[in-house]
Every structure is written in structure tokens, then in C-alpha cells.
Amino acid sequence: METIGKQHTDHANRILVTGGTGTLGRLVVARLRDAGREVRVLSRHGREPADGLEYATADLGTGEGIEAAVEGAETIVHCAGSTKGDEEKAANLVRAALPAGARHLVHISVVGADRVPVESALDRAMFGYFASKLGAERVVTDSGLRWTTLRATQFHDLMLTTASGMARLPLIPVPSGFRFQPVDADEVAARLVELALGAPAGLVPDIAGPRVYDMADLVHAYLHARGKHRLMVPLRLPGKAARALRAGANLAPDRAVGRLSWEDFLAERLSASSPNGSGPSG
Ligand SMILES: NC(=O)c1ccc[n+]([C@@H]2O[C@H](COP(=O)([O-])OP(=O)(O)OC[C@H]3O[C@@H](n4cnc5c(N)ncnc54)[C@H](OP(=O)(O)O)[C@@H]3O)[C@@H](O)[C@H]2O)c1
């Protein structure tokens, strides 16, 4: 696999952002650039350097290309993630970062990683994400690197994707008792950058959005903003993980430090995405 094609060992304070092409990572990269830092983005899809950004082609899942990507990076902000396998991605990253001399690994995790039990096959099928985030946290903690981990609640963008997907259905099944406390991804990015530019701090206080919503209310606000009407039916999900979510394991009401509300996010996003308010499809 192609790797970065230039010498970079002289740039000791360069910051590597894994997942710097994603929702959160892009915002982190922009803020680091605004802070005047040299940034390298790790992505599976290589690109030519542009706008002062350097790209490293690597796959954290297979391990390919990571050694070259971490070379010369004092700080690594690990924003790459997917619904599965984040423990392995983190393990491959730290395996390369430790001998390369990285001094600070900043990691984004999810609120509830330590509170959602993923025990049965059913739990794993629906909520395995939480177990893989907890696994990644443990990899970071035990890495031998100095680290900082921030847990965030769900981003508005994720809730928007979820709500717009649900709105395509004529009748919307909504997991009963589920609540969310969505947070603005750019507010999370700002906090991650603050942490990346500071000293390693271990597990720091969670970041969560300003309000807790019933899932039905989140979907309803989306439907309202889009001028749509749908029937919603409560669906009781089985398993221990679902029970933990009904008990609020994914919430951090005492850390409601986010400022942008779901309603304001929807108003901004739906008006920005289309002049006639059509917004995301669905
Ligand atoms: N979304 C949420 O609500 C939420 C809440 C709390 C925490 N988080 C955590 O925040 C992080 C970012 O989430 P996001 O919503 O911004 O994700 P996203 O938009 O889906 O972006 C995922 C990023 O991960 C990279 N990636 C995925 N698999 C990779 C692999 N095998 N090797 C290298 N890079 C890989 C992708 O890069 P390429 O495709 O360019 O390779 C992409 O930049 C994740 O760790 C997630 O668990 C998310």
C-alpha cells in the first residue's frame, strides 16, 4: 500500500489525526490548522498534500501503512472508528506509535462504553459498538504511551442520519425507553484539540449535549423540521445492553456542557443543505 512520499522526521511537533477525513476528524484537523499546527491525516484513501495538509495512507484494521504514518508525530489524535473492530484498530495504532516515540495519544470514545454490558450474541449484534469502544479504551490505557481519553455522547450528525433513515419508513419503530443527549461534533472537536495541545490527562470528564431527549422526541423534531408526518410505534428491544440504554447508560446529564441544541442543529443543517428546506433525503 502507498505511504507518504516525503521526508518528515524534522517536523517533531507534527500532529497525526487518524480519521481526519471523518465527521469529527475533519473538524479536529481544521481547528489544529487554525492553531498553526502541522497536521498529517491518516486515511485508507491516500491523497496528494493540499492546503498545508499531508496525508498518510494506512489501514488501521489491517495494520498496513501505519509505521510510516506515525513517524515523526509527537501527538496522535485518534478519531478513526467504525461500528466494529475499534479495539483492533487501536491495537494496531499503538503497536506502531510506541516504538516511533509518540508522546501523547488522544482518543475519542463514547459515553456508556463502560456501562453497556455486551454479553449475549443479541447484545453484540445490536450494541457491540460499545464493547469495541471499551476495548479500544483499554488498549490505549495499557499502551505504554501517555494518553488522554474523552468520552462523548452521540453527535447530532449521527442522530440526523438515524432520524432521516427512520423517516423513510411509513411506520417508524422507535426503541422504547431510549434517550439520547446529542452533542455538536464541532464542540467535541474543540475539546479534543484543547486536550491534544495540553499534557496527557488520562480519562477526562465526559462531553455531552445540552439536553436529554426521548428518542421519539428526537425523531419527532426531525419530522417537524422537514414538515413530515409519520406514525411511530414503540419497540421494546430485548437484552441486557438495551436494558442499560433504557436506564440511561449512554447519557451524562451532569456533563451537559454542549451548547448547540438538537433543534438549533436541525434548523442550521436543514436550511443549509437545501434552500427549499428539503435537507437530507428521507
Ligand atoms: N458519531 C458519534 O455519534 C460518536 C459519538 C461518540 C464517539 N464517537 C467516536 O468518534 C470517532 C469519529 O466518529 P465519526 O462519527 O466522526 O466517524 P466517521 O464520520 O464515520 O469517520 C470515520 C473515520 O474513520 C476512518 N476509518 C475507519 N476505518 C478505518 C481504518 N480501518 N483505517 C483507517 N481509518 C479508518 C475513516 O477514514 P477513511 O474512510 O478516510 O479511511 C473516517 O475518517 C469514532 O471513534 C467514534 O466511535 C462517535
Image (cartoon, rainbow, N blue to C red):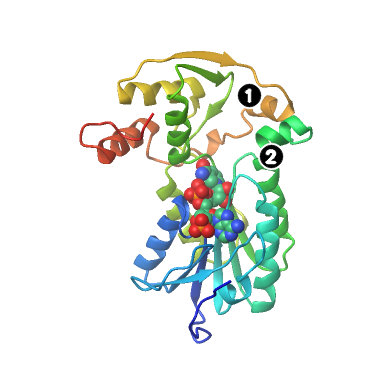
Q: Is 261 placed left or right of 172 in the picture? A: left
Residue in view at x 71 percent, y 69 percent: 95
Residue at the (46%, 49%) spot, across then down: 188
Q: Is residue 227 above or below residue 114?
A: above
Q: Which residue is mark 1?
A: 246
Q: Is residue 197 above or below residue 8?
A: above
Q: Residues within 10 Å of mark 1 (few under 14, many from 20)?
A: some
Question: Which quadrant would the C terminus be assigned to in this image?
Answer: top left
Residue 151, position as x, y percentages in the image:
58, 47
Is 5 situated left or right of 122 in this image? Answer: left
Q: Amino acid at mark 2?
A: Gly
Q: Mark 1 belongs to which amino acid? A: Arg
Disc 2 designates what residue? Answer: 128
Residue under the point 51% across and 71% down: 56
Q: Nearer the viewer, residue 43 or 261?
A: 43
The spot of residue 77 in percent (x, y) is 54, 62
| Residue 153 visible from this viewpoint | yes
Name which residue lies at 58% across and 71% down: 1
- Report whether 62 appears left or right of 44: right
**Tag 1 or tag 2, which sits nearer the N-term?**
2
Name the foreground residue: 282 vs 34.
Answer: 282
Counting every numbered tag in the picture gives 2
Can you name the residue that lies furthest to the left here?
275
Residue 64: image quadrant is: bottom right
